Structures are given as structure tokens and as C-alpha cells.
Image (cartoon, grey):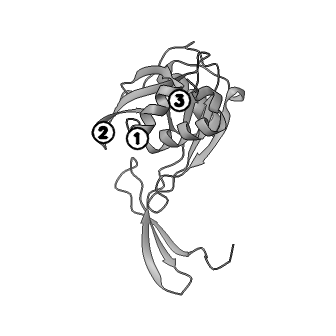
Amino acid sequence: MSDRIQKWKVLEEQDVSPSSWFPIIRHRVELPGGHTDDYYFSPLGDVVQVLAVTPENHIVLVRQYKHALGEILLELPGGMQQKGKTLLQSAVNELEEETGIRAEQEQLIPLGRITNNPTKTRQLTYGYILFNAEFNAVQQLDITENIEVITMPAVEVLDLVKDGKIYVTDSVNFILMAALKYPEVFKP
């Protein structure tokens, strides 16, 4: 690859957030050609998701209302990286809180990382897969959460992605990554 593409130089940074729930940063930047401009983005923080596979090759999904979209969605369990916790600690915590599946960090296998909108947000989502997932704890939902846990055969989950019925970007990506890396899980 050439060195034709260069990073922008940050001249000034200012927090212009309307609230702690939705941070916004303004950067005064100098582009490689010398032009300066204001650039706004949201450093939302990183996210974790877990594709939990039961011994029967069923995938654990969560169904919940997402207010910004105004829709009830089907997706993989997960959430924001928790303050003071590593990505793996956050992943096992979110999995247990949302689904009632307790796992150890060592059981999670990384699927990869994705970014949804790198033009306007600073946020990476890290995906993990857990094999032999068992419901061995109790959901511990936040006050704003109302989650229905659903399990279905992996091949049917893949069909829901193909049919556009699962359309949350990170969930789609990690389901497809898992299908590519572990095709035996998704066979009928």
C-alpha cells in the first residue's frame, strides 16, 4: 500500500456533548493538503457481543425494544464495555445479565472486531463465540431492559440473517463470521 493516504492532524479538541449518554467531540483538524476544518464525532465506547451455542447447536438470541430505532429487534446478547472491566469481563457479565448463561472468560473465543460507522463514531464491537452454553444462572436486567431470550437452531438463525429478519449490524457480522469459521455449527 502506498503512503498516499495520511492521518489528519488534530489541532484542538473540545467536548461539546449534550449529555453523558451521547458524547460528542469537536476536533479542529488540519488535512494533509493544509486545509483546516471542524470535525464532529461521537466516542461512544466499545461494545461486546457473544454468540452462545448450546450443545444442540442452537444459538442464543435476545429480543428487545431499541428506542432510538423504535423497533423490537432480535440480536446477539451483549452491551457496552463496563467501566473498569476488560472486554472479556464485560462479555461474560453481559451474557449472564441478559441471558442467564454464566461462562468463564477462558471459554470465549474471539470472532473478531467490527466498526459500524467510523465516519461519525469511535466505537468498536468485539465478538466472541461460546460453545456448550448452558442456562445456569438468572437474568439480571438493568432497569431499562426487558429481554426475551430465544434459542433456535444455528441454521435457522442463518436463514433469519439471509431473510433480513436479523438486521442489527454487529449481530449479522458475527453470525456470518461464525458461519465462515465454524461451518459445522450451521449445517442442518
Residue 132, how many percent across, how many down? 64, 19
The reply to whether dot 1 and dot 3 touch (C-beta < 8 Å) is: no
Amino acid type, callout 1: Tyr
The residue carrying mark 3 is 94
The single residue placed furthest to the front in the displayed view is: 188
The residue sitting at 44% across, 79% down in the picture is 37
Mark positioned earlier in the residue sequence (1 or 3):
3
On the picture, is 100 further left or further right than 160? right
The residue sitting at 42% across, 74% down in the picture is 38
State the residue in front, 13 or 154: 154
The residue sitting at 51% across, 56% down in the picture is 122
Calculate the distance from the C-alpha at mark 2 to the C-alpha at mark 1: 16 Å
Residue 168, how many percent across, how many down? 42, 41
Name the secondary structure under disc 2. Answer: loop
Name the secondary structure under disc 1. Answer: loop
Pair 2/1: label in front: 1
Name the secondary structure under disc 3. Answer: helix
The residue carrying mark 1 is 167
State the residue in front, 46 or 159: 159
Mark yes or no: residue 116 visible: yes
Badge 2 local density, few (<14 within 10 Å), some, or many (20+)?
Answer: few
Amino acid type, callout 2: His
Residue 18, how many percent across, how many down? 34, 55
The residue carrying mark 2 is 67
